[in-house]
Amino acid sequence: VQLQASGGGLVQAGGSLRLTCAASGRTLSRNAMGWFRQAPGKERDVIAAINWNGGSVYYADSVKGRFTISRDNAKSTVYLQMNSLKPEDTAVYYCAARRATDWALATSEMKYAYWGQGTQVTVSS
């Protein structure tokens, strides 16, 4: 499975971006998915996760109420809508997929088998 993350860019504080994670090589309709981010000098952290059918989602406290994760299984695509962006949201954002047998969402990156290449999000003040 190859994951391609896109949609990052430079935005002013208070603005919005939508990240897209598209899969190729295999459908992701049964894989739980997650979005992670890594700021300079910091560890990579989970910010949002979704189970295989979208019925269960997780958000880190830092993005709760501002970010929304969703998925379109017909397109093997996962989205991260980011609103009210803050300078502290600046980071490289990664999408990840669990194995097809792992339907439940997870918050540990150790439980994800496939990773996209990352997309840079920069929020200016």
Image (tube, rainbow, N blue to C red):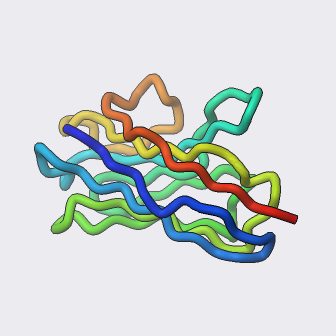
- Residue 56, picture quadrant: bottom left
Name the spot of residue 107 as percent of width and height, x first: 52, 37
Q: Residue at x 34, y 65 (%)?
A: 71
Above or below residue 60? Residue 14 is below
| Left or right: 83 in relation to 98 | right
* Quadrant position of the C terminus in the picture: bottom right
What residue occupies the far top of the structure in this picture? Answer: 110
Q: Residue at x 48, y 63 (%)?
A: 7
- Residue 87, picture quadrant: bottom right
Name the spot of residue 97 as percent of width and height, x first: 33, 41
Q: Residue at x 38, y 31 (%)?
A: 112
Above or below residue 21? Residue 3 is above
Most foreground residue, 23 or 31:
23
What residue occupies the far left of the structure in this picture? Answer: 26
Name the spot of residue 25 as percent of width and height, x first: 12, 43
Most foreground residue, 9 or 88:
9
Above or below residue 52? Residue 114 is above
| Left or right: 12 in relation to 125 | left
Above or below residue 93? Residue 15 is below
* Quadrant position of the N terminus in the picture: top left
Q: Residue at x 51, y 49 (%)?
A: 119
| Left or right: 85 in relation to 114 | right
Name the spot of residue 74 as percent of width and height, x first: 16, 68
Looking at the rendered structure, the number of numbered marks drawn on it comes to: 0
| Left or right: 96 in relation to 18 | left
What residue occupies the far front of the structure in this picture? Answer: 10
